[in-house]
Image (cartoon, rainbow, N blue to C red):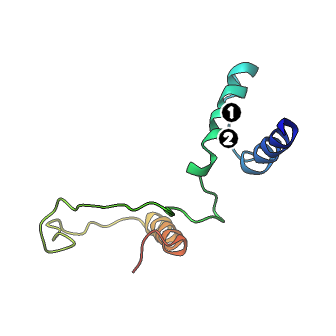
Amino acid sequence: MSSFKDNYKEEFVSNKLSEAQINPELSPKMKQELINVLYKYKNAFASENEHLGTMRRHEVDITLNIDRPYPPVLRRPAYPSSPRAREALEKHIQELIKLGLIRK
């Protein structure tokens, strides 16, 4: 049984942590402890191909602490931003829409 768990952990490290940047100054013991914690809480993370913000089998009650109207009226004038910044923002917004975290 332990061998199966070790194989699954190795697969997790090679697939999920392959792009992670772990501090090279960590001792081997500290690096292993970090990997163990990440593996233990692996369900708290998502990759680009997985859904974010999804909870199953849990009922959640969210109380808004703002008064109507929703959303609140913004009282700031729009400020100009560079084309590069607008492009980056639009790309990020489209990614969040694609992941289902926000909607238009």
Q: Quadrant of residue 41?
A: top right
Numbered disc 2: secondary structure: helix
Which residue is disc 2 drawn over? 39
Q: Residues within 10 Å of mark 2 (few under 14, many from 20)?
A: some
| Residue under the image location 68 percent in, 22 percent down | 30
**Looking at the image, which residue sits at the far bottom?**
104
Residue 36: percent from left, percent from top: 68, 33
Q: Amino acid at mark 1?
A: Asn
| Residue under the image location 22 percent in, 62 percent down | 64
User: Is the residue 56 above or below the residue 12 in the image?
Assistant: below
Q: Answer with left or right where residue 14 lies relative to residue 17.
A: right
User: Is the residue 91 above or below the residue 25 in the image?
Assistant: below
Which residue is disc 1 drawn over? 36
| Residue under the image location 49 percent in, 68 percent down | 96
- The answer to whether marks 1 and 2 mark residues whose Cβ atoms lie closer than 8 Å is yes
- In this rendering, the count of numbered labels is 2
